[in-house]
Amino acid sequence: MSRIILFDGECNFCDKSVQFIIKRDPKGNFKFASLQSDVGNDLLKRFDTPRDLDSFILIENNQCYSKSSAALRVCKHLKGFWKFLYIFMIVPRPIRDFCYEIVARNRYKWFGSKESCMLPSPEERNRFL
C-alpha cells in the first residue's frame, strides 16, 4: 500500500525533506505530490482538508494526517534510526504541533523558497503523482 505525502513545492525545506525521505525509503512506500499541483488539490478536496492548510500532509490507509502527526508517521516507516522518532507520538498533539508550527511559520525565512517545484530525477519520477 502506498502512502502519499503532500508537500509545499515552493519551499526549500520541504523539497529537502522529500529528498531525505526518498533516500530512506528504498522500498518506495511513499508517493509524493505538491500541494500546488492538480493532484494535490484534488486530494485536499477529497479528504476535506481546510483550504488554508499548507502543512506537510500524509495520506495513509484512507486517513489524512497533518503537521507533527504526519511527520512522525513518516518517520515510523523510514530506514534507520529515524523510525524511533515515532515514540514522540506519546507527546500530546498540541505540544508537538506547537513545535512543528514554529518551523512551518519560519521555513521560508530560514530555508528560502523557489518559483517552482523541483524536477525529480528519472529514477524518482515514478514516485511523484
Image: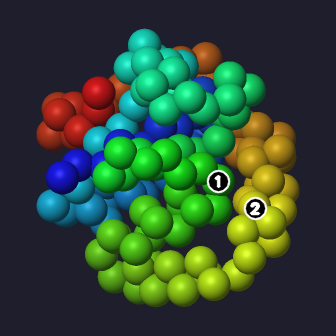
Residue wearing tag 2? 97
- Amino acid carrying label 2: it is Asp
Circle number at residue 67: 1
Quick one: quadrant of the C terminus? top left
Q: Distance between the Cα atoms at labels 1 and 2?
A: 6 Å
> Is residue 68 found left or right of 9 in the rendered image?
right
> Is residue 23 found left or right of 86 in the rendered image?
left
> Is residue 39 found left or right of 110 in the rendered image?
left
The x, y position of residue 94, in whole percent, is 80, 66
- For mark 2, give the secondary structure: helix
* Vertical position of residue 108 compared to residue 24: above or below: above
Answer whether residue 15 is visible to the viewer in this image.
Answer: no
Residue projecting furthest to the top: 38
- Residue 113, quarter of the rendered image: top right
The x, y position of residue 61, in whole percent, is 32, 52
Q: Earlier in the sequence, mark 1 or mark 2?
A: 1
Answer whether residue 94 is visible to the viewer in this image.
Answer: yes
- Is label 1 in contact with label 2 (beta carbons under 8 Å)? yes
